[in-house]
Amino acid sequence: MIETERLILRRWEERDRAALRAQCDDPEVMRFLLPVADDEAFEAMLGRLSSWQESHGFTFWVIERRADGAMLGLCGLKGGAPDTPIENMVEIGWRLGRDHWGQGYAREAAQATLDWAWANLDAREIVAITVQANAASWGLMERLGMVRDMGGEFDHPLVPEGSPLRRHILYRIARPA
């Protein structure tokens, strides 16, 4: 568990299911992500989150607001996807429900995640990816001190050919000295 002034980042629990499903079903939340089309895909996603925690000691954790226990979204770490330039690297990511945008929660959770990573992992750097159109996400990457790898664009193999979400940009942040 990671705690900040306003947030708790923690493992997934059954009580988080409805809020996460609602976020996955919101077209605005998922605008720059692959859709979670059905219950089978949703269960597979939950299985991946649990598997990452068990095998690596980290995952995309629940972001819970301390004041009222509301599930705001997710933020955390995972291994970079196979057959991409970030394979075998540690990737940071986040997603919040639309009602929680613009309040600094993503930055607070992401900074706490980076702090946790530097204290608990031996990674020399952390990476993040998104699509060029997702200015909110890459803007947060820059506010966190991440730097765009101008030669790091790639077509994500898990995104279908022809999709406007296939081309990804890459940001990096080195372990602090």
Image: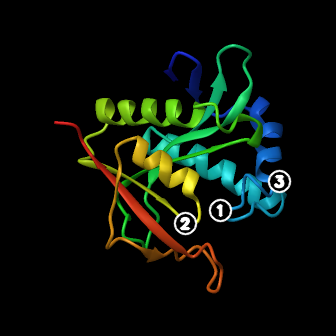
The amino acid type of the residue labelled 3 equals Asp
In the displayed structure image, the side of residue 115 where residue 23 appears, left or right = right
Residue 154 locus on image (x, y percent):
44, 76
As measured in the structure, the alpha-carbon distance from the residue carrying label 2 to the one carrying label 3 is 20 Å
Q: Quadrant of the C terminus?
A: top left
Residue 24, above or below 87: above
Q: Count neighbours of disc 1 (C-alpha within 10 A) and say few if under 14, some if 14 to 19, many if 20 or more.
A: some
Q: Residue at x 69, y 13 (%)?
A: 67
State how many labels appear: 3
Q: Count neighbours of disc 3 (C-alpha within 10 A) and say few if under 14, some if 14 to 19, many if 20 or more.
A: some
Q: Which residue is mark 2?
A: 131
- Element under disc 3: loop
Q: Residue at x 76, y 55 (%)?
A: 28
The amino acid type of the residue labelled 1 equals Phe
- Element under disc 2: loop
Q: Residue furthest left?
A: 177
Residue 151, above or below 13: below
In the displayed structure image, the side of residue 48 where residue 175 appears, left or right = left
| Earlier residue among tags 3 and 1 | 3
Q: Which residue is mark 1?
A: 32
| Earlier residue among tags 2 and 3 | 3
Residue 36 locus on image (x, y percent):
75, 60
Residue 4, above or below 16: above
Q: Count neighbours of disc 2 (C-alpha within 10 A) and say few if under 14, some if 14 to 19, many if 20 or more.
A: many
Q: Residue at x 72, y 57 (%)?
A: 30
Q: Is there a contact, CB below 8 Å, between mark 1 and mark 2?
A: yes
Q: Residue at x 36, y 30 (%)?
A: 115
- Element under disc 1: loop
Q: Residue 25: which disc? A: 3
